[in-house]
Amino acid sequence: MTIKTLALAAALSALTAASGFAATVQLNVVGGQLLGARNVDVNGTLYDVEFVDDTCAAIFGGCDDVSDFDFPTLGLAEAAAISLGETVFVDGPLGNFDSDHGLTAGISSAGGLGFGIIMVPYGFSSNAGIRRVAGRSFLNEDDGDSLTFSSIPIGSDLSSDDNIAFARFTLSQLTPIPLPAGGFLLIAGLAGLGGLRAWRSKDTAH
């Protein structure tokens, strides 16, 4: 294989990696239970998420200021919830996490209500509650996912509730590279090929 072919292959590989880098969500499944996921895309930023049963204060460092939450606006919390529904709570080879709510950490099929909710908090209500959007509501499973907006008391301990858990997001180790950046890599590679060819032609002439 010539140097030119190798360089072109490297440039194309860089373009492919750059354009598809952010697309892979990795589910964290242990013993058939969905504990969370990695590389969840929320408005172009990748996050790792885990589903946790505890008090808001324990999970979000006090739960006394909007800045404690992973997404301090309704728009971001809703985007995170939608991403969970579209990329994490799906049926697949690792488990039927869309069909069976009892397979998600913090949610029990024996909860009695026949549904489960994963919550993404974003603010506080005037009556001392935590405003949140449900990232995954298993209400009426046959009807599909749904988003709900409401609040719960700040001191609620979800470890005693079989139907509700929090989603805790942290920035992923990976950073998505937009497609234009991949294009620049390809252009740089092709420019390098041109320079190499010109250099070899000049060297041969001497």
Image (tube, rainbow, N blue to C red):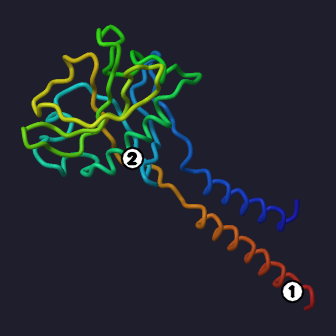
Decide: is 4 above or below 44. below
| Amino acid marked by disc 1 | Asp
Identify which residue, 21 or 125, lies in the foreground: 125
Q: Quadrant of residue 139?
A: top left
Query: Tag 1's secondary structure?
Result: helix
Res. 180 mark: none
The residue pinned by badge 2 equals 79
Whole-percent x, y for residue 163 in the image: 28, 19
Tell whether label 1 touches label 2 (CB within 8 Å): no
| Label 2 vs label 1, nearer the camera | 2
| Amino acid marked by disc 2 | Ala
Q: Left or right of 63: which side holds 46?
A: right
Identify which residue, 46 or 120, lies in the foreground: 120
Q: Quadrant of residue 201?
A: bottom right
Query: What is the quadrant of the C terminus in the image?
Result: bottom right
First along the sequence among labels 2 and 1 = 2
Which residue is at a point 13% across and 27% down the rendered structure image?
156
Q: CA distance from mark 2 to mark 1?
A: 57 Å
Decide: is 23 above or below 150. below
Whole-percent x, y for residue 69 in the image: 23, 45
Q: Left or right of 197: which side holds 192?
A: left
Point out the residue furthest to the left here.
127
Which residue is at a point 16% across and 38% down the rendered structure image?
130
Which residue is at a point 32% across and 51% down the rendered structure image?
75
Circle 1 packing at 10 Å, graded few (<14), some (14-19), many (20+), is few
Q: Quadrant of residue 157?
A: top left
The residue pinned by badge 1 equals 203
Which residue is at a point 61% across and 51% down the rendered structure image?
20
